[in-house]
Amino acid sequence: MSTLKIESEHSILKIRASTTDRIGSKLLYEHIVELAKEKEIEGATVYRGIMGFGSSSKITSSRFWELTEKLPVVIELVDRTEKLRHFFSEIEQDLVTMPKGCMVALEPTEILLKKKGK
């Protein structure tokens, strides 16, 4: 029998964009992660994709013989659902006014283990 406690009411906020997208003079993913840390969001991870496209862009990819800066990126934030909804409301206007496109999704999740490091 497992002694892990399953917590509910948590979600993952996923922001899909490009590695070159910016909010002001800062890269979008840096802006989001730094703001999430400031707002005490439980966790954030940025993934750089090797291939992808958005509804208004062409397919971009990373191949070992090509040097490209514009690649897909996913910014994932994990916390309580309501906290993530509030965080999104704080960044929504920045995303809407950004010249490039993006997609934001909120996915329910269960936290099976949350162990702080030293």
Image (cartoon, helix red, strand yellow):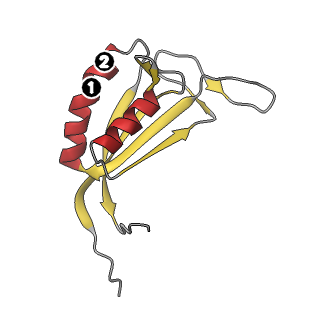
- The front one of 94 and 15 is 94
Contact flag, marks 1 and 2 (Cβ < 8 Å): yes
Checking the image for residue 45, the label placed there is none
Residue shown at 39%/37% (left/top)?
Answer: 34
Residue 16, image x, y percentages: 44, 32
**Which element type, helix, strand or loop, lies under badge 2?**
helix
Q: Where the C terminus falls, by quadrant?
A: bottom left
In the picture, residue 51 is in which quadrant?
top right
In the picture, residue 83 is in which quadrant?
top left
Q: Where the N terminus falls, by quadrant?
A: bottom left
In the picture, residue 85 is in which quadrant?
top left
Asked whether the viewer can see residue 55, the reply is yes
Residue 78, image x, y percentages: 34, 50
Residue shown at 35%/83% (left/top)?
Answer: 2
Residue shown at 53%/22% (left/top)?
Answer: 20
**Please, what is the three-letter code of the amino acid marked with disc 2?**
Val
Residue 106, image x, y percentages: 30, 41
| Residue topped by disc 2 | 96
Height in image: 51 above or below 37? Answer: above
Height in image: 80 above or below 4? Answer: above
24 vs 5, left or right, is right
**Please, what is the three-letter code of the amino acid marked with disc 1?**
Glu
Q: Residues within 10 Å of mark 2 (few under 14, many from 20)?
A: few
- The front one of 53 and 16 is 16
- The front one of 7 and 46 is 46
Checking the image for residue 92, the label placed there is 1
Height in image: 42 above or below 88? Answer: below
Asked whether the viewer can see residue 16, the reply is no
Residue 55, image x, y percentages: 46, 20
